[in-house]
Image: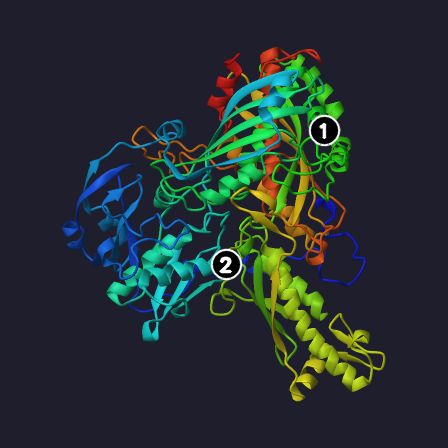
Amino acid sequence: MSAANLWTAPLADPLVVGASHPHESARAHVAGAAPYVDDIPEVQGTLHGAPVLSCVAHGRILAIDAANALAMPGVRDVILARGIVGDPMLASFAGDEPILARDTVQFVGQVLAIVVADTVMQARRAARKVNVRIEALPAVLTIQDALDAQSYVLPPVFVARGDADAALQTAAHRLSGSLEVGGQEHFYLEGQIAYALPQEQSQWLVYSSTQHPGEVQHWVAHALGLDLHAVRVECRRMGGGFGGKETQAGHLAVWAPVSANKLRCPVKLRLDRDDDFMVTGKRHPFWYQYTVGFDDTGRLHGLKLMMAANCGFSADLSGPVADRAVFHCDNAYFLQDVAIASYRCKLNTQSHTAFRGFGGPQGVILIETILGDIARHLGMDALDVRRRNLYSDEPLAKPVHAPARRDTTHYAMRVEDNILAPLLSELEQTSQYRQRKQAISSWNAGSAVVKRGLALTPVKFGISFTATLFNQAGALVHVFLDGSVQVNHGGTEMGQGLHTKVAQIVADELGVPLHRVLATASDTGKVPNASATAASAGTDLNGRAAQFAARHVRDNLAAFVCGLDGCGAGAVRFVGGQVHSPKATRSFDEVVQLAYANRIQLWSDGFYRTPKIHYDKTTLSGRPFYYFAYGAACTEVAIDTLTGESRVLKVDILHDVGRSLNPALDIGQIEGAFVQGMGWLTTEQLVWNERGRLTTHAPSTYKIPTAGDVPQHFRIDLWPQANLEDNVGGSKAVGEPPFMLAISVYEALRDAIDQARGDSPAPGARRAPVHLIAPATAENVLTALRAR
C-alpha cells in the first residue's frame, strides 16, 4: 500500500486492525490539549532544580563553593553528592556512573550539584554562580587515543566464523580502508524533565518523560534507599524519545527526588536545550578499519573488521549497542569467512547511549561502504555487487565450515524469512533504477558543476531485545459497566502510535469500535517490571500482552453467553459492537451488564514472552532475534562540486512491515526514520574542541533536517506479505528498521563524488574508493572530491 491511497483503500472486513486510524492523541496534539510533564499543574510549594556542570573534561575536584549561589534570591539549597541518602552511584548496568560527580569529573557537562530555588530561572542563574575548582588531568578525546591507551568501558569482543586470513590470502582482489561515522543528538522536541512529589509514609510519585518507567523506579529507589514498591513512576506521553530517554531520563528522575528528599517538598527539574546537549549522551560515533577479499564478480571472500565505538566516560548501554553493531555488520549479506573485533572505548565525553537503531546503523553502513567500493574497484554497478552477496538458500561450494548454505548469519542464526531478492527486484523496477542510472550518467556528462548520484541499498534488521530477559510484557484490560474499555500496558507513548495500535488490537479482540477503547498512562503501579519501549518491540510485546488480556475477558463473556443460549463458546462471535450466538444477537454493552449481574469477571491481565529466542552473550551466537524486518530505498542526490553542498532529489522506498496494523502510522514512521537517518549522514555534525567541550550544542550550530530538506518525490510502498512468525496481527516492527534506509543517501553521495572525480567514467572502468566521512557535510564532501 502506498501513502497516496491510505484513506481511500476499501476495507476487506470490518476489523479495526489493518485500517489507517488517526493517532489516539492527534486532536489533542493539534489543539494543544495533550499535556506533557511540564504541563502537569504544580503542587503548592513546588521548587525547581538546575544542574551545575563541569567545565573540565577530566579533573580532580578540589572544592565546590556554593556561597554566592545560596545568597541569590529564591535559592533554597545546593545539593551535592554527600546529600544522597542511598547509594551515590546510579543503579545502571555497570554501576560505573555517579549520581553527582564525586572526587573527579570525567567530561565537560558532568553534573556536580543541583541548585534548588523557587523558580526555574532563579535556579538556573544561581547554578552559574557556583564556584568549582578543578585540577585538570589528561583527557582522552579521540577513539584513536583510546585504542592506543587501551581505555575501555567494557572488554573488547571478538567474533569469527571460518578462516578470514586464509580466505583473504586466496582472494582474487583485496581492499583495505577505514571509515569514520559521527554520532547524533536525539533532539526530541520535549527536553529531559522529571517532577518528583513526596507522598505519605516515605512513598514517592515521579512524573518522568521516560521510555523506561521501570528503570526510573529502580534508580530512584536505589538513590533513596527504598524498596521498589515505595516509588511509583508515571508517563502519559513523551514529546519524542528516539532512545535518548531510555536511560538518560533516569538521571533527572533521580536528581529531582534526591533534591526533594532533602528539602521535603516537590521538585521539578527541566533541562534547557543547551544543558540537555551538554549533559546527555548521543548516538555512538564509530571508527572502523577493514580488509576485504572478493572475486571478479564482487562476491566476498574473507573479511576482517575492526569496529571501535566512542562510548563516552561510562558504559551505559554501550555493550549491547556495540553488540548490535556486530550483529548487523552483515546487513543483508552472507559473510562466510569473517573476523570481527569490537572495541568499546572510554573517552572523556558524554556517555553515549541508545539511539534509534541501537548500533544497527553503525554496523550496516560499514558493509554498505565496503560493497560500494568493491563495485568501484571492479567497474561494476553497486546493485549487482549487493545482489551477488545477498543471503540465499544457495549451497556453499565447499562447506568446510558450517553452515552448508548461504542462509546463516555469522552469529549462527538462520535467515528463514528471506524476502531480500524479490523485494530488491520489485524496487529496482518500480524506481526505474537502471534507466535512471543511464540518465544520470548522461546528465553528469553535460553538467560541469552539479553532479548527481544514485544508490539502491537494502536493510535486514533483527527484531527483539538482544538481552533475552527484556522480551516480555504485561497488560491490563478493564471492561466497565457501560461497555467502554480501558487498557494499560508497560509500553510508553512517544508519538510513535503505540497506544493507538494497542487500542486497535484490543478493540478487535473484543469486537467493539475503536472509540470505545482508551489507553491510559504508563504506570509502574499498574504493570510492574516492564521493559523499556525500545528495540522496535513496543507493539510486538505490549500489543500481544494486551491481546491476551482482552481475550481472557472475551472468553469469560463467551462462556457466559453460551450458558444463556445453550451453545458452544466457539460459536459466539464478537464483532461491530455486537455479540452473536446461534440463538440471539445482543449488544456488547448489554452482554457486559448481564455478565456483571451474574458476577462474571470483566477485567483481566495478559502476559507475553517472545518465543524461540536464545543466545550466548559470551560468544554472541544463537538466535537473538525473533524475526527480521526488511526494506530497500533508492535515492537520487545532487552535489555542488564547488561548495560541497548536497540535496536529496528523489526517494523511493519499499518496506516490509508484515501485515500493517495501521498503514498511516507505519508510513509515518518510515518517513520520519528515513529523514532522521538522512540527517545523521548529511548535516548533523557533533564537534568537540581540543578541551573536550561540545561546541555544537544548540540549533544555531547543530542542524537537523527541516521540511525543506524532504524531497518532493518521496514515495513509500509497503511489502504485501504478513510476518511468517506468529506475531501480533501478522505485523512486523517499524520503529527502527527504516532508519537504515537512509544509508542509500550516503551511498548516492559517494556515487556522485565518484562520478565527479572520474568525469563520468565509462561503464566497466575501475575507480578508486571514495573516502567520505559521515556526516557528509559540505566540508566533508569537498574533502572527498579532492582526494585521489
Kind of residue indicated by mark 2: Arg
Whole-percent x and y of residue 435? 76, 23
**Closer to viewer: mark 1 or mark 2:** 1
Whole-percent x and y of residue 753? 58, 18
Circle 1/circle 2 CB separation < 8 Å: no
Whole-percent x and y of residue 15? 75, 62
Can you name the residue that lies furthest to the right here? 582
Earlier-in-chain disc, 1 versus 2 = 2
Residues at marks 1 and 2, CA–CA distance in whole angstroms: 42 Å
Is residue 531 shown left or right of residue 733? left
Q: Nearer the viewer, residue 468 or 37?
A: 468
Q: Residue at x 21, y 40 (%)?
A: 60
Asked which quadrant contains residue 651, the reply is top right
Q: Nearer the viewer, residue 280 or 139?
A: 139
Residue 349 higher or lower than 243, as above or below: above
Other-residue count near label 1 (Cα within 10 Å), few / some / many at <14 / 14–19 / ≥20: some
For label 2, the SS is loop
Q: Residue at x 25, y 58 (%)?
A: 117
Res. 237 mark = 2
Observer able to see residue 644 = no
Kind of residue indicated by mark 1: Arg
Observer able to see residue 646 = yes
Which residue was labeled with disc 1?
A: 387
For label 1, the SS is helix
Can you name the residue that lies furthest to the bottom here? 597
Res. 661 mark = none
